[in-house]
Image (cartoon, coloured by chain):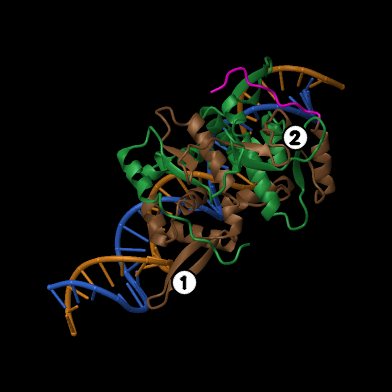
Chain colours: A green, B brown, C blue, D orange
Amino acid sequence: MQPKSPSIQECPVGRAVETVGEWWSILILRDAFQGSTRFDEFERNLSIAPNILSRRLAHLTKSGMFVRRRYQERPPRHEYVLTDKARDFFPVIATLLAWGNRHLAPKGETVLLANRDDRRPLDPIVVDAADRQPITLENAVVIAGPGASRLMRRRLTSLKAMNPAVAPTGD
Amino acid sequence: MQPKSPSIQECPVGRAVETVGEWWSILILRDAFQGSTRFDEFERNLSIAPNILSRRLAHLTKSGMFVRRRYQERPPRHEYVLTDKARDFFPVIATLLAWGNRHLAPKGETVLLANRDDRRPLDPIVVDAADRQPITLENAVVIAGPGASRLMRRRLTSLKAMNPAVAPTGD
DNA sequence: CTAGTAACTTGCATTTTGCAAGTTACATTC
DNA sequence: GAATGTAACTTGCAAAATGCAAGTTACTAG
């Protein structure tokens, strides 16, 4: 992973990808959201090689997604606990899960999100916090924010009038 | 990317990661959502090596995220047009952008989502389609769906009572 | 004292990624 | 008609990341 061009470094999506961009990271977080905290729990569930898991956990810890907490002295044992930053990442996993269910589950959905209390299945959609109206590619655009550089600002204004092309055939 | 363990293959998140798991793929889609369609547009914006871009575009096309359309005969020129499947992926990018803005923009947000018509900034949150109540790690759980295997079903019921640990310090 | 468990690390082979350069096919300009 | 430009790549090779198997440390239980 090489952080180079301004359109990667200067974009929140690009920076997010630097944190969780290795594909194992997403899977580790998914398991953590389901309650896994220990090295060997991740190792077993994911069938990931221990050296890779070690690196990923170290990277996610350095990035502030996990806190490494000793849960027992003598012998020293640790668990990886999700930080608030990581917990805020849950909506990303939720939308990814919903998308996977919609488009990558030809033989029926294997995993669903449900309400913790009454087990009612949940259908995650993305809306604006203010008016709870759905946000779609059709009604949303990206604009420059207060921290945007001159270059980024110029790039964004140059495409603001553009309407994305529509494919004739879907999936 | 090696698709092996059932907890990867059998999970919508795992399968999603197989489609868009290379970090460039997310960035390519981000640019496509902003209107890029041509090889050299992606190449310039991302400073990506052409061979890598070529592979990613081929992979995303094979996965049904792009349709390769000839927009001009003689000389043959193509553009990569988003399919409905890819357009449905937009909420994932939107939540990723929101997360990046919240946690990875110490010097102010560079890019914001806004309403296409009135330019009002949007704050994307994930809610249940039925009642528009926010979905969070606190009120949601994953449960087995109709297509779940016996193994997956057992794994999911074994963790259903579990409450994820909370980190003492956030980010 | 032997076996087991948790959490790793090390060495080495395989795979993926990245850079630079070359290719094809045409269009335009001098 | 020769040289330059553009779009969309491919090829060759070096560098980095990943994956597997085995080893390590530090204990606990029997």
**Pointer 2 and pointer 1 on the same chain:** yes
Q: Nearer the viewer, residue B88 or B145?
A: B88
Q: Residue furthest top?
A: A73
**Mark number displayed over residue B70:** 1
Let me know if residue A48 appears in the view. no
| Up-down relation of residue C8 to residue B9 (above or below) | above
Q: Left of A126 or right of it: where is B156? A: right
**Magenta-drawn stretch contains A132:** no
Q: Chain of mark 2?
A: B
> Residue at point 48% right, 62% down?
B80
Q: Residues within 10 Å of mark 1 (few under 14, many from 20)?
A: few
Measured from the top left, where is residue A28 in percent x and y? Answer: 64, 37
Q: Quadrant location of the C terminus of chain A?
A: bottom right
Q: Secondary structure at mark 1?
A: strand
Please tell me whether the stretch drawn in magenta is mainly helix, strand or loop: loop
Q: Chain of mark 1?
A: B
Q: Which residues are magenta?
A: B161-171
Q: Quadrant of residue A86?
A: top right
First along the sequence among labels 2 and 1: 1
Measured from the top left, where is residue B141 in percent x and y? Answer: 75, 34
* Residue at mark 2: B141
Measured from the top left, where is residue B168 in percent x and y? Answer: 62, 17
> Residue at point 80% right, 46% down?
B145
> Residue at point 74% right, 58% down?
A106
Residue type at numbered disc 2: Val
Let me know if residue B102 appears in the view. yes
> Residue at point 53% right, 51% down?
A138
| Up-down relation of residue A66 to residue B142 (above or below) | above
